[in-house]
Amino acid sequence: MRIFNFLSKKVGDLTIKYSNFPESYVKRSYEQVYWKTPAGYPQYTKAQIARKKFRFTTNRPWTGQFRMQNDRGVLRKKVFLEPIKNWTFFKGDRVEVMVGRDKGKQGIVCQVIQERNWVIVEGLNTHLRVVGKDANFPGVTIQSEAPLLVTTGVKLVDPETLKATEIEWRYTEEGDKVRVSLASGRIIPIPKTSEETIDYKTKDVYIENAEKDTTADAATKITFDPKLRTFEMDVMEAMGIKEERTPAKSYWY
């Protein structure tokens, strides 16, 4: 069990560092280095002066909006997050706002930011901000939704009573994990919109391309026959090479 947990942790770390969107790219995209030791001078001790504190908002760290917000030098106190073991809010959920001037109003979740325990509810908890203001232009005032904490700011709406309710995860007889309302016992299904990609596509509307995609039949077909032999033995068998020498014993631990 210890070995399994260790391997699971290592695989998770490698996935974060070397996935299609690696952690190194995110760090490199938002770091601000003001000075560092020039390359090619081994007599100098490696050192650099860089910004260490950043203001993280709803903008992703690799976007231009994030860089603009941090160029202003506006910092806020450090934010400590409450770990959430089982995430219960998804895009498309109907929720009720529990804080602020929109308290008691219900809306649809349009964006989920798990890194900060945030959800953004469409048309609720809004504020006005001025965009594009300079010396010769007064700017444009737009209405923007502010994020809400899932721990205190919102609750899911019961589909039977249409009121805010606490939920818990349970398993059906078929083994499916579902969200159940504690008020009525009704299952709150996960919306289909939570499966949408950035180009608004879901699994149901996707059409397989035989030339580019691995089909379902090919994915279930066994193409590898494991054998108790080394790679060199496989090559020798394919090329018709016979080994008459007795190999030395090897031990596996």
Image (cartoon, grey):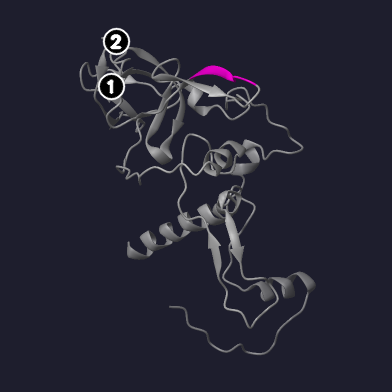
Asked if residue 158 is positioned above or below residue 67 in the image, the reply reads above
Q: Is residue 139 on the magenta stretch?
A: yes
Say what amino acid the circle numbered 1 marks.
Val
> Which residue in the protein does label 1 denote?
99
Along the horizontal axis of the image, is 127 left or right of 86? right
SS for dot 1 = loop
Asked if residue 36 is positioned above or below residue 70 in the image, the reply reads below
Q: Position of residue 127 (x, y in %)?
A: 43, 20
In the image, the segment drawn in magenta is: 137-143
Which mark is drawn over residue 55? none
- Disc 2/disc 1 C-alpha distance (Å): 18 Å
SS for dot 2 = loop
Q: Position of residue 234 (x, y in %)?
A: 69, 71
Report the quarter where the N terminus lies: bottom left
Report the quarter where the C terminus lies: bottom left
Q: Position of residue 103 (x, y in %)?
A: 29, 16
